[in-house]
Image (cartoon, helix red, strand yellow):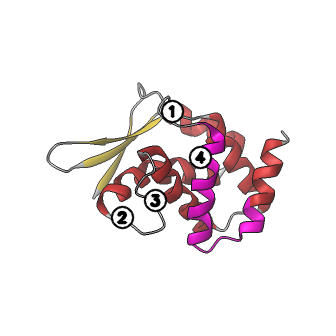
Amino acid sequence: MIAIFRNETAPNAMLVATASGDAKIVYAPKFFTSIYNSAGDGAIIAVIAHELGHALSETAPVAWVKSGWPPELKADAWTGCAIAKSNLQARDLQETLATLAKYPSPAHPAWNARLPALETGYRQCGGDAARFTAAAAARGRK
């Protein structure tokens, strides 16, 4: 089980795991309000999915998440999966990708390394690769 907690002093959102195996997602309400107001539900789904993806990568590995990827790319792959399952409209998908690009943690690799991991998860979970490519291209033109 993973609990979700609001924390006014959190910088944005993060997964906190303990030595006993417990985990929680901690988020700053102002951060969620900001990304919701600029990009909508898809952005909230993506941020939560990314944090949850860290836990899934450790506890439920799947073949399509490359074992050689660093933790941030593994979490991005799970994020792509969640985005696909959300079946976002084209504009919402563009805004979601823009939000992910805008708010990387210091540990994230460059966007051009993250995008293939996001697309892998998106395709593996039933998303249309052409829609993803179009949204990623549109995001890049902003």
Q: Label 1, on which residue?
A: 105
Q: Label 2, on which residue?
A: 61
User: Of label 1 and label 2, which has the lower sequence position?
Assistant: 2
Cα separation between marks 3 and 1: 21 Å
SS at badge 4: helix
Q: Residue at x 71, y 71 (%)?
A: 128
Across and down, in percent, residue 22 comes to 21, 49
Across and down, in percent, residue 28 comes to 47, 33
Tell me which corner region of the image, top left, top right, bottom left or bottom right, holds residue 37: top right
In this view, the residue in front, 123 or 102, is: 123
Across and down, in percent, residue 66 comes to 46, 59
Cα separation between marks 4 and 3: 13 Å
SS at badge 1: loop
Disc 3 versus disc 2: nearer the observer: 3
Cα separation between marks 3 and 2: 9 Å
Q: Label 3, on which residue?
A: 66
- Image: 63 above or below 77: below
Q: Is residue 35 visible?
A: yes
Q: Label 4, on which residue?
A: 114
Q: Is residue 61 left or right of residue 104?
A: left
Q: Residue at x 43, y 45 (%)?
A: 70
Q: Is residue 44 magenta?
A: no
Please rate how many residues cluster around mark 3, counting C-alpha atoms within 10 Å: few if below 14, some from 14 to 19, many from 20. some
User: Of label 3 and label 1, which has the lower sequence position?
Assistant: 3
Residue type for callout 1: Ser
Residue type for callout 4: Arg
